[in-house]
Each structure stands twice: as C-alpha cells, then as structure tokens.
Amino acid sequence: MKVPMLDLHAQYEDLMPQIRAQLDEVFATHHYIMGAQVKELEEKMQDYLGIKHAIGCASGTDALVLAVKALGLGAGDEIITTPFTFFATASSIWRNNAKPVFVDIDPQTFNLDAKNIEQAITSHTKAIMPVHLFGQCSNMDAIMEIAQKHKLRVIEDNAQGIGSTWNGKMSCAFGDIGTLSFFPSKNLGAMGDGGMCLTNDAELATALRQLRVHGEGPKYYHKCVGLNSRLDTIQAAVLLVKLDHLESWSQQRRVNASYYDKHLAHVGDIKTPYIDPQARSIYNQYTLITARRDELMAHLQKKGVGCAVYYPLPLHLQECFADLGYKAGDFPVAEELAKKVLSIPIYPELTQEMQQYVVDSIKEFFS
Ligand SMILES: *Cc1c(COP(=O)(O)O)cnc(C)c1O
C-alpha cells in the first residue's frame, strides 16, 4: 500500500463538475482581476469567520506583508513572533524593514509561548505576530492581554488555522488583522496561490484594499506605495465551491486525528499532538515527536508512507537572518523540536485502511 502525505486527486474528484461550472461563469465574463467572485468569496468568508471585513490578495505571504504595512510598521519597529513556523511569517516583517524578534515556543502546542513575550518587549516593540501552527489556535487570551497592557498591535498568521477556535471564538477574530493562505496544500487550498486579510477595523480594511492595488485611490493617484496583490477571480471561483466543504473536512481531520491519538499513544517514545482543552484544532498537520525521527522517517518512506518535517531549521538560525544576531541555543524548545518532529498524513480523504497501515508501519519500526 502507498499512503501519500496529501492527495489532491481524492479531494477534487467529486468537486470538479461544480468547479468547472464556476469557472465557466468566469470565462463568460473574462473578468479575471477583481471579478464578482472575489467580492462574493470575501463576503462568504466574513460570514464564516464572523469578521466584518475580508480582503483577498495574491498569497498568504502577501497577506502578511500587507498587514504589517497597513498597520504602518516599518524601519525601527520590532515585531515579536515565533521562530518555529514557515519562513513567510518572519520574512513579511523583514520585507517591511521592521525587525522580527523571536521568542521560544510552548513545547506542547508548538505555538508562541505567551509567558516568554513580555521579556522580549522593548521601547521599539510595536506588534506581536502569533502563528496558529499545524491548525491549533494559539492562547489568544494570554496574547491579547499582553498586547493590551503594552499597547501592541496583533497580526494573527492563520495560514494553517482556518476555522480553528480558542474558547469558541474563531482564529483571525482576536487581533487587529488575521491572515489566510490558500496555497493548494492548505486546508482550504486554491488551484494556485491566494491569500486573504481579515479585520474588524473599517480603517484598516480601507488601507488593506488600497495597498493591494499599488496604494491607489482614486485610480492613478497614490498616497502610498502598495503592492500589486489581488486574489485572481479564477481562484475565488474555485474557493467559493470549496469553502462549503471546509467544516466537514476539518471534522474528518479531527476524526482521523483521534484514530492516531488512540493507536499511537503507547508506541515507542512517540508523543502525539497535544491540543489545549480551550482550543479546537483543524489539524493542518498531525505532528509526532520522537527522538528517533530521522530513522522513523526513513522507515516510513521505505513503507510508502508519506511524511514530512515541518520545520527542520528554526527561523532564528536561517542564514538570511544572520544579521539579527541570534545563535544556536537561543531558543532551546524550538531547536529541539526541529530535530524531533515528524508530520504524518491527516488529510480528510484518508481511509481507515490507510490509517491502519500508517499505524502498523510505525509500530513495526518501534517493535
Ligand atoms: C503557508 C504559510 C504562509 C504563506 O502562505 P503562502 O500562501 O504560501 O504565501 C505563511 N505562514 C504560514 C505559517 C504558512 O504555513
């Protein structure tokens, strides 16, 4: 048997007729930039997340770049974030000439550990950028409390967490701006790149709408220099079909996770993912911790089981950020987990048989 890490064929199989019909509507207008479907998707996302304003853009990375810009952050400003995340979290800060300031993560949830934040605050700190990693919402009560106390802005990088909650409230709804990614392998993936910013603040929404079209308003008049970063009409049309299925996909991921939780609980030295009782995860990844990570990975590859390491090198040790002055040992939790994490297939279309095979293959390794 072979179990891929992700199977988009399985996901699209039933959806293609509906998607083709939606695409035909776009082709009937040839309105490829900011067509009606973009606004329709923005409104549908506002309803789904319970947030007032949604602004589609070209990628999850751009959503973060736009968010930092819309908050007026740049040279001389510091933004506190996690070193254990996808590169774009920190690069969005860097690309605005602001400085990413890393703090270590919680060893159980992999998310920014709120109790490390205050010691990193300086007179230059302007914002906190938590990431809802692997689909689990960060402890937003603790983060918002610190933000309010120190008058800091909050940008939620929710590229991996669409539909996750903290105490029943949707991720993206806590901070000043939340961002989404529609990269094809995300829980809500487009047929190419796409992203979105969400905010309850009307002024920020206006700024974000201007910034995604070169900072323009009215047309050909520019108060500031923005990006060219729109969500394609074609991608919005695809996402309109897929958004209807997102809740049931997330639910199936949770069912799959509970199967692994049960069957991998006492296998070798494996630690299965810890989900805080106040959080509801959408399991963008199902990530194991084991000291024998590299050997287990080689074994699973031999058995035809897809698996992946997210992420092998924390951001404070990336060559491009050498100027920030961090060194190995600065964030021991992130550094240790980078050596021990292994994500295994969790996508909703996995069958019980496939999951059984994954479990058996892991058990075989440890026996
Ligand atoms: C995927 C991802 C991004 C970037 O999204 P793109 O759409 O690929 O640009 C940003 N942050 C995190 C945590 C991600 O996982």
Image: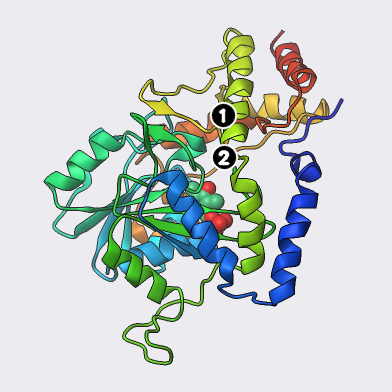
**Which quadrant of the figure has residue 31?**
bottom right
Q: Secondary structure at mark 1?
A: strand
Query: Looking at this rendering, what residue extends furthest in the right direction?
Result: 1
> Residue 202: image x %, image y %?
29, 63
225 and 218: which one is in front? 218
> Looking at the figure, which quarter contains the C terminus?
top right
Kind of residue indicated by mark 2: Tyr
87 and 211: which one is in front? 211
Q: Which mark is residue 221?
A: none
Q: Which residue is mark 1?
A: 287
Kind of residue indicated by mark 1: Thr
291 and 133: which one is in front? 133
Q: Which mark is residue 310?
A: 2
Q: Residues within 10 Å of mark 2 (few under 14, many from 20)?
A: many
- Residue at the image position 16 percent from the left and 46 percent from the top: 148
Residue 112 shows in this picture: yes
**Horizontally, is 69 left or right of 337 in the view?**
left
Evaluate if marks 1 and 2 touch, with contact meaning CB atoms under 8 Å apart. Answer: yes
> Looking at the figure, which quarter contains the N terminus?
top right
> Residue 22: image x %, image y %?
71, 59
**Horizontally, is 341 left or right of 333 in the view?**
right
**Which quadrant of the figure has residue 302?**
top right
Q: Secondary structure at mark 2?
A: loop
